[in-house]
Amino acid sequence: MPDVPDVLDLWDRSVRDHAARPALVTPHRVLSYRDADRLTDAWAASLAGRGAGPGELVGLAFGDPARTVLGMLAALKAGAGFTVLDDRLPPAARAALVDRTAAAVWLGDGAHAPERAYVPP
């Protein structure tokens, strides 16, 4: 059976082939593949330093969808899985979900993020 590239393989190929092209476009910023790769490498190192890795989950609770996407990629680079906390859930449901997931690390900002969540550098 031939090797099938995973998400990170495809990402690395895109960074290599399209480094200067836009990878993430929002109303407030444009990140090239190179810049997004460097940012998510830094986030992944921060996550790994806080216990994220194989067999662990990273919780994501950003109000900004672009940061959520960056967090997903960073979690995968750290070797972890991820879960996203929906800000539309009532507070009690969000708290229950945070407890059930037992994420090693939470990234996020805003009122719906768990108290221990942080925004990586």
Image (cartoon, rainbow, N blue to C red):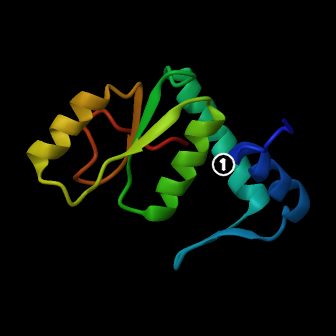
Q: Tell me which residue sits at (49%, 56%) in the image.
A: 67
Image quadrant holding the C terminus, namely top right
Q: Tell me which residue sits at (79%, 43%) in the image.
A: 4
Image quadrant holding the N terminus, namely top right
Amino acid type at image mark 1: Leu
- Nearest the eye: 47 or 86: 86
Q: Secondary structure at mark 1?
A: helix
**In the rendered image, the vertical position of residue 54 relative to residue 9, given as above or below:** above
Is residue 59 rendered to the left or right of residue 3?
A: left
Q: Tell me which residue sits at (12%, 53%) in the image.
A: 90
**How many tags in the picture?**
1
The residue sitting at the right extreme is: 17
Neighbour tally class for label 1: few under 14, some 14-19, many 20 plus, Cα within 10 Å: some
**In the rendered image, the vertical position of residue 68 relative to residue 28, given as above or below:** above
**In the rendered image, the vertical position of residue 77 relative to residue 17, given as above or below:** above
Q: Tell me which residue sits at (60%, 38%) in the image.
A: 76
The residue sitting at the bottom extreme is: 27
Is residue 106 rendered to the left or right of residue 40?
A: left
Give the x, y percent position of residue 108.
38, 47
Give the x, y percent position of residue 23.
70, 66
> In terms of image quadrants, where is residue 106?
top left
What residue did someone put label 1 on? 39
The residue sitting at the front extreme is: 1
Is residue 54 rendered to the left or right of residue 35?
A: left
> In terms of image quadrants, where is residue 77?
top right
Is residue 1 rendered to the left or right of residue 32?
A: right
- Nearest the eye: 3 or 39: 3
- Nearest the eye: 30 or 121: 30
Give the x, y percent position of residue 13.
85, 53
